[in-house]
Image (tube, rainbow, N blue to C red):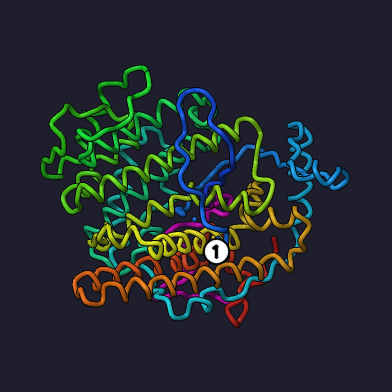
């Protein structure tokens, strides 16, 4: 059966994207840990109880990642502490887990039917135009053919067009360049083969530079910020090349101080994005967004330190609590306002109900992606996914997906309840209510859009497994 969503099909996406079944689009995997040395980490408030995404999709080329094994033969007290295995033992456990899962059949229900009252609109009509623009940026940012081809396979335009299917081109373009940027910086710190991913000191300097670069182009450089970490000077050609990339943009200088050097060309793409945000959003909005960017980078440092020391999440709750902060879904809660041209008043943003809306959006996207990407992640040798994490805890595969889907349904219901309360709060302010309604629909759309994207994209290879009722029986 050929799966069809909206007005386009998997077959049409094969023609747009090509078949790259040796690639995997997944949300970055994160783990718990503590920073050591260079600076003090400001931990945010604890995440809500995990009922709990890209997410932005990306291609991640992974080294073998060790797993923690909790020995059932130890005492009850000892069993509460994960045992860090040697690298060789971790790799053996990793390989055994993949071997056990591969070949099993995972039944996946029609997840979109669980969100039948939420919008699911297909692909933005400006997709092809956006793709041409993003491909041009990729062409200029990557000097070699290999890097360009690797970046183009990610097709940031397709992802953005699925998440934001009904906005105009200018807003879609703003979302598209952010999607390119967030993938590029994450890949620099996380992807196998990138120098920064193996050098914690260099990547820490990079993160500090990137945070300050973002603050400058969000018009916040005159406000308190971090002191830049010591770093070798960037090549003077970077600024001139970045300026040429965005020569068509009208001049806009959000701050009186000299323009900082970008750490590298891909990171420099934030310049145009930041200029666009400055034109349409308040200082308070931009400051909150910048703090969320810093929080994202801080947790990337935690993840990198743990990856380099061979640690990983010992159980599902730990896994979800870290991914809550590092999936970039929280950043997209701001991007959704930017893409729809709205700014939710701070008094609403500060309510417990809005926090619930953000939390549940994060969890729905993370969990749906984990189910639909499990086959491809296992094929790539990655077990940082809710499915193998739960399987490693001794649960049969047949019981895992129903539990994850139930969590998603619970998140959906909490979202709906919180959204209704927010709408009630502002019902006497028609303009605010209109913005809130549009924003809530936007968050619902990126949630259903994740299911649509993972289902349609040939990168996941799910087409052969569809049943007539919309469910799938996926052979891992």
User: Where 410 sits versus 42, above or below?
Assistant: below
| Residue 383 left/right relative to 155 | right
Percent position of residue 168, x then y: 23, 64
Which corner quadrant of the image does residue 209 belong to?
top left
Percent position of residue 178, x then y: 33, 49
Identity of the residue drawn at 16% across and 28% down: 257
Identity of the residue drawn at 66% across and 34% down: 310
User: Where 121 sits versus 156, above or below?
Assistant: below
User: Where 92 sits versus 229, above or below?
Assistant: below
- Secondary element at tag 1: helix
| Residue 149 left/right relative to 429 | right
Which corner quadrant of the image does residue 198 belong to?
top right
Q: How many marks?
A: 1
Residue lying farthest to the right in this orientation = 73
Residue 76 belongs to magenta span = no
Q: Is residue 230 visible?
A: yes
Identity of the residue drawn at 20% across and 33% down: 222
Q: Along the line of sight, which residue is nearer the eye, 44 or 377? A: 44
Residue lying farthest to the left in this orientation = 251
Q: Along the line of sight, which residue is nearer the eye, 407 or 456? A: 407
Q: Which residues, given as a range, are shown in magenta?
A: 1-26
Q: Quadrant of the C terminus?
A: bottom right
Q: Is residue 129 visible?
A: no
Residue lying farthest to the bottom in this orientation = 469
Residue of label 1 = 368
Percent position of residue 456, x then y: 49, 66
Q: Quadrant of the N terminus?
A: bottom right
Q: Residues within 10 Å of mark 1 (few under 14, many from 20)?
A: many
Percent position of residue 152, x then y: 41, 47
Which corner quadrant of the image does residue 165 belong to?
bottom left
């Amino acid at each position: 059966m050929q799966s069809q969503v909206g007005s386009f099909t998997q077959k049409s996406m094969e023609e747009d994207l090509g078949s790259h079944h040796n690639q995997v689009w997944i949300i970055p995997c994160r783990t718990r840990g503590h920073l050591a040395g260079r600076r003090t980490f400001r931990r945010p408030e604890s995440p809500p109880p995990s009922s709990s995404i890209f997410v932005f999709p990306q291609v991640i080329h992974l080294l073998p990642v060790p797993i923690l094994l909790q020995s059932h033969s130890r005492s009850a007290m000892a069993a509460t502490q994960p045992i860090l295995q040697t690298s060789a033992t971790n790799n053996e456990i990793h390989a055994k887990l993949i071997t056990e899962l591969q070949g099993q059949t995972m039944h996946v229900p029609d997840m979109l039917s669980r969100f039948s009252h939420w919008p699911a609109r297909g692909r933005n009509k400006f997709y092809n135009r956006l793709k041409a623009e993003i491909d041009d940026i990729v062409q200029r940012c990557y000097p070699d053919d290999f890097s360009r081809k690797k970046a183009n396979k990610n097709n940031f335009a397709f992802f953005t067009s699925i998440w934001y299917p009904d906005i105009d081109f200018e807003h879609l373009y703003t979302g598209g360049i952010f999607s390119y940027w967030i993938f590029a910086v994450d890949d620099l710190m996380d992807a196998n083969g990138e120098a920064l991913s193996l050098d914690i000191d260099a990547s820490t300097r990079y993160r500090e530079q990137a945070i300050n670069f973002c603050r400058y182009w969000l018009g916040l450089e005159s406000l308190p910020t971090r002191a830049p970490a010591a770093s070798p000077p960037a090549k003077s050609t970077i600024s001139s090349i970045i300026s040429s990339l965005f020569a068509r943009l009208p001049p806009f200088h959000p701050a009186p101080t000299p323009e900082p050097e970008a750490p590298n060309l891909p990171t420099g793409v934030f310049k145009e994005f930041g200029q666009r945000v400055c034109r349409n959003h308040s200082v308070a909005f931009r400051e909150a967004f910048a703090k969320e960017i810093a929080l994202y980078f801080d947790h990337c440092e935690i993840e990198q330190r743990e990856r380099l020391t061979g640690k990983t999440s010992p159980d599902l709750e730990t896994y979800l609590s870290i991914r809550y902060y590092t999936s970039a879904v929280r950043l997209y809660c701001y991007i959704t306002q930017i893409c729809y041209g709205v700014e939710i008043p701070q008094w609403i943003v500060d309510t417990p109900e809005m926090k619930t809306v953000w939390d549940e959006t994060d969890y729905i996207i993370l969990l749906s992606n984990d189910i639909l990407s499990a086959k491809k992640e296992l094929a790539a040798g990655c077990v940082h996914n809710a499915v193998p994490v739960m399987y490693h805890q001794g649960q049969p595969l047949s019981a895992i997906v129903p539990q994850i889907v139930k969590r998603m349904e619970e998140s959906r219901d909490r979202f709906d309840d919180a959204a209704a309360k927010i709408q009630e709060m502002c019902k006497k302010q028609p303009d605010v209510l209109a913005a809130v309604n549009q924003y809530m629909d936007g968050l619902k759309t990126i949630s259903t859009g994740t299911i649509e994207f993972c289902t349609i994209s040939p990168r996941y290879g799910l087409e052969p497994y569809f049943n007539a009722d919309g469910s799938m029986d996926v052979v891992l």
